Image (tube, rainbow, N blue to C red):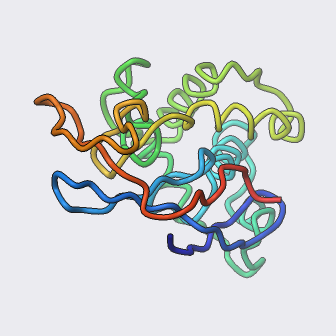
C-alpha cells in the first residue's frame, strides 16, 4: 500500500491509502484506487465534475470555483479547469472509455464544446441539470457509479472482472494480465 493526498469535496486535503497489486506475468505493480478517484489526479472525481459544471454550465468564475475547493482567493485563474474541459471523455484518466459511446471524438477546444461534452456525460449519469447545490447532492453516488468496477491506466480501462485475484495462469491474448493483491484492503469509501 502507499499513501497519497487527495482534495475531497468538503473536507479539504486528505491522505488515503491505496492498495497495490503485483502481476506475476509482467512482474509490474498496479494500484486500485477508490471508485471516487481517477489515477494521477489531485482532486476527487466528483470535485472535477462539480468544478466543470460550475464553470461551463452555471458560469461561475475560476476564482469563485477555486475558493469553493480550497484555493487561495488571490488566484484569479485555475488552469486545471481548461485542462479538465479538454480531457473530459478523451483521457483514460477522465472517463475516456465513455467518449466513443457518447460520440466524442476530439478534445473540447472551446467553452461551447466543453458544455456539450459535460452535458452528455451528465446525461449518462442520469443527473438532471439544475442549481449547483442540488446538482452536487446527487453527484457523489453518480460519479462512483461511473468509476466502480474499472481498472485503468493513462491509456485504457478494463472491467475489474478481468482481474481475478489469485489466478496464476497467463491470460488469453488481448486481455490484461491477472493480478494478486499485495496488501490488505485500503478501503473503498469516499472521504468523510
Image quarter of the C terminus: bottom right
Q: Nearer the viewer, residue 123 or 178?
A: 178
* Residue 4 higher or lower than 24, as above or below: below
* Residue 133 higher or lower than 10, as above or below: above
> Among all residues in the image, which is located at the extreme left?
173
Choose top left, top right, bottom left or bottom right for residue 135: top right
What residue do we see at 67% from left, 46% from top?
46
Q: Nearer the viewer, residue 5 or 34?
A: 34
What residue do we see at 42% from left, 63% from top?
182
Q: Position of residue 25 (x, y in %)?
A: 17, 51
Q: Position of residue 102 (x, y in %)?
A: 43, 19
Q: How many marks?
A: 0
Q: Position of residue 42 (x, y in %)?
A: 56, 66
What residue do we see at 52% from left, 65% from top?
79
Classify residue 8 as left or right of residue 90.
Answer: right
Q: Nearer the viewer, residue 85 or 7?
A: 7
Q: Nearer the viewer, residue 103 or 18?
A: 18
Q: Position of residue 31 (x, y in %)?
A: 42, 58
What residue do we see at 77% from left, 57% from top?
9
Classify residue 31 as left or right of residue 119.
Answer: left
* Residue 46 higher or lower than 28, as above or below: above
Classify residue 83 as left or right of residue 145.
Answer: left
Classify residue 35 as left or right of residue 90.
Answer: right
Choose top left, top right, bottom left or bottom right for residue 96: top left
Amino acid at each position: 500500500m502507499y499513501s497519497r493526498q487527495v482534495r475531497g469535496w468538503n473536507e479539504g486535503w486528505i491522505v488515503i491509502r491505496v492498495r497495490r497489486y503485483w502481476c506475476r506475468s509482467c512482474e509490474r505493480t498496479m494500484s486500485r484506487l477508490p471508485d471516487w478517484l481517477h489515477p494521477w489526479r489531485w482532486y476527487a472525481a466528483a470535485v472535477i465534475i462539480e468544478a466543470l459544471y460550475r464553470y461551463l454550465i452555471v458560469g461561475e468564475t475560476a476564482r469563485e470555483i477555486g475558493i469553493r475547493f480550497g484555493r487561495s482567493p488571490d488566484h484569479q485563474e485555475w488552469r486545471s479547469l481548461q485542462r479538465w474541459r479538454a480531457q473530459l471523455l478523451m483521457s483514460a484518466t477522465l472517463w475516456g472509455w465513455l467518449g466513443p459511446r457518447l460520440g466524442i471524438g476530439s478534445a473540447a477546444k472551446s467553452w461551447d464544446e466543453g458544455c456539450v461534452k459535460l452535458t452528455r456525460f451528465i446525461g449518462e449519469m442520469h443527473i438532471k441539470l439544475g442549481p449547483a447545490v442540488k446538482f452536487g447532492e446527487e453527484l457523489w453516488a453518480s460519479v462512483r457509479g461511473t468509476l466502480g468496477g474499472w481498472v485503468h491506466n493513462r491509456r485504457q480501462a478494463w472491467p475489474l472482472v478481468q482481474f481475478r485475484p489469485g489466478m496464476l495462469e497467463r491470460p488469453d491474448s488481448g486481455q490484461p494480465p491477472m493480478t494478486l493483491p499485495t496488501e490488505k484492503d485500503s478501503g473503498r469509501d469516499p472521504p468523510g
